[in-house]
Image (cartoon, rainbow, N blue to C red):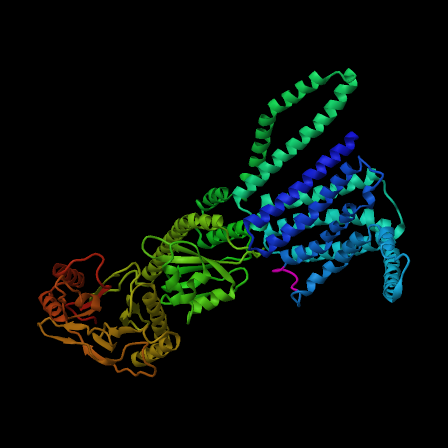
Amino acid sequence: MPGIDLTYTIINFTLGGTLFFLAVTALRDNFSSRLNVVSALLFLVAGLTPIFWSLSSVIQQYPTSSNPFDESRLYSLRYATELFFPMLIMFSLAITARLAFRPGRRYLKYLIFLPQSLHLMAALVFTNVDSLFNSLVIENPDGAIDALLQEGFGSLQMLILKIHVLMDKEDKFFPIINTLYGAGALFILYQGLRRASNQTYRKQSLIIFVGAAVPVLIYAAVFAVNGVFGLEYSDTILTPALTAGTLAFVMAFFWAVIRYQFLNVGLAVRQSIMYTISTGILVGVYLIMAAYAGDWIDEITGGQGIAIYIGVVVLALVFFQPLNHQIEELIRRMFLRSRSDFRNLIETFSRQTISVFEPAELRVIIEDNLKEHLMIEHVSFVLFDDRVGEYSLLPGERFDHRHIIDRHDTFLGGIGQLDGPAAVDELSSFREGSRLGELLEARATELILPLSDADRLLGFIALPAKISGSSYTAEEVNLLKVLSNQLVAALTNARLYSETVEKKRLEEEVAMARQIQIGLLPRSLPSTDGYSLAAHSTPSRTVGGDFYDVIPLDDGKLAIIIADASGKGVPAAMVITQIQAMIRSELKNRNSIQSALENVNNYLVSVTSPEKYATLCFGIFDPKTRVFEYSNAGHNYPALVRCDGTYEHLMVGGMVIGAFPGTTYEAASVTLNSEDFIFFFTDGISETQNEHDEEYGEERLLEKLLEMRGQDAESIIKGALDDVDKFYRVDPPQDDRTIVVLKTLGTKDP
């Protein structure tokens, strides 16, 4: 046997054996998967070509004159290799079932096997036409029965002759049919490749497409061209071409299985495949080298080098194990530590998320990793939203809307009871009446990955069915269980970081608002020989809802305002800012106190909600006459304390500002004598509570004011604050505290 023929024989035996091994592996690892079954059948049929080619090469080396091999039924079995083309169409339909075509009639697709099946049956039946024809001849017919049989056999002979004529043209007809089948399969595979959105699945599909295209194109170039143009190729062209096509097919599917998890074969099985094939390849190389070494030694030694040949074989066996180990190590570095190694996924994920604290960015990393390694089209997140106090189904790549999930949803309750990843079907008892269940069903969810810390369910990740249609393996479920702990830690860190950033941002905004609010307060208070003014304001938070203003008017009068907005913090301060701007505008327009308050009230009602209101006391003091005209809009009654120890409250006015539309206000006037003072304050003074829940109260405040009536304005404020702190001191105060004191002095201005 020539050396080159031996090389091709060994290669083709190895390729055929590899395909049979892949077929057995696909069935053994996941027999329930339709894709695995169809792929296994494709591998079996594809493996027939190199095996049959090798057997033919071996048998034809030992021809027999009595029964030539090319006239035997065994030789006719070569037509079974044509089943590769309809099987390739079946495979293309199976692998693209979720992305491309779904035949309307379930069993109609099996008719594609009809031409090749009839061709195989005809080849087996009509292997020896002469023998079959002669077997239908009745020698020396005798009687009516023989005559009838002879007539029937004659009809069969005519049919055999017609079929034989057709069989003479089968070398032109069937290669064209098979090429059309191959083109159809490639078209379907291309449609699936074009529509694939998952990058890993797209790479897998591209490799499979190339692996299928190479043998189809080689077959078309060798056999279909021969059928159309009558060209014939020698074995020196046919053998390498067919070997190359088979090799490309084997390498493509081998790469897809090992590198991109095609057929969902587990890691241990992939290891077995690689080590088995590497050992087989090394053995094949050894056999080829041994054959060439034997011929070379015989040529040099004249057939006397048996001892040298034995020595070479022994030396090769000594190096077999080290070489095999090096090949296995190379394969392990190339494949087992690649992206398909799930241990690597966990390490990669840890490195990617260790420095990511933005929740949205973290979700993108999680989604990209799961889509790539599990080959799924999308990932859905349901996480607890602290802003609304409920769980939210977040929008994603294919789903635009965000859905709030009631924390009492029955399906969510079922997920909260899970200890690890679970199929959606396991939660079917919680499905009835669940909106979450309906949303997940719309997203074709197949697997739930709960995310829980020690205290509560933080949320979960919903994974759809795989693009390939295969189920999640036990290895993948275990991976997700390990990965969930990292996800919980990463999401918790991201949430805490986000809360910290948000808190810092709010603090900065509040500090800025406080600076703005301080800027709105009077920088200095006017005073003359006839009166003095003093003021104090302490917010319970950085930004308060209390406010005061003193505005000198063009006619020498003085506008005094004190207000307290409902609530605290920035919202209350915003209401106060609007009130200040409106009152200044009203003063500029020279509107009366009553009109000013009515206009401010109607404006606030139109731009705010009813719960955002303010109490306010607004008055105008005339230093010449010592007359104070005022209107009290639901505010704490300012106390007018006279030097003789009497007092009165400024009560005339109306409802609070900003709560009711169309509210009207009244105004009143009081005249201050020498050494009288008006004490304006907010409820943060009078409503301060001690540890016994007792209020400081306006009576206690009034007693203190009467006691201090002989002091100046600054001292009165200090004494009042000291007395409140003596009652109960807390920093910051329980509520905003604001005081304004207007005191007339001993002599009247001229």
Quadrant that contains the C terminus? bottom left
Q: Please say whether residue 707 is one of the residues in the magenta stretch.
A: no
Residue 578 image position (x, y, % from top left):
36, 70
Question: In the image shown, does 354 or 686 lie closer to the viewer?
Answer: 354
Q: Using the rendered view, name the quadrant where residue 717 is placed.
A: bottom left
Q: Residue at x 30, y 76 (%)?
A: 657
Q: Residue at x 34, y 69 (%)?
A: 575
Residue 123 image position (x, y, % from top left):
80, 52
Quadrant that contains the N terminus? top right
Question: In the image shown, does 65 or 302 lie closer to the viewer?
Answer: 65
Q: Using the rendered view, name the quadrant where residue 495 is placed.
A: bottom left
What segment carries the magenta color?
Answer: 97-102
Q: Is residue 211 above or below residue 468?
A: above
Residue 22 image position (x, y, % from top left):
62, 45
Q: Using the rendered view, name the quadrant where residue 536 is placed.
A: bottom left
Residue 78 image position (x, y, % from top left):
76, 47
* Residue 401 shows up from this direction: no
Question: In the image shown, does 420 or 558 lie closer to the viewer?
Answer: 420
Main SS, magenta region, reads loop
Report whether 416 appears left or right of 1: left
Report whether 171 appears left or right of 350: right
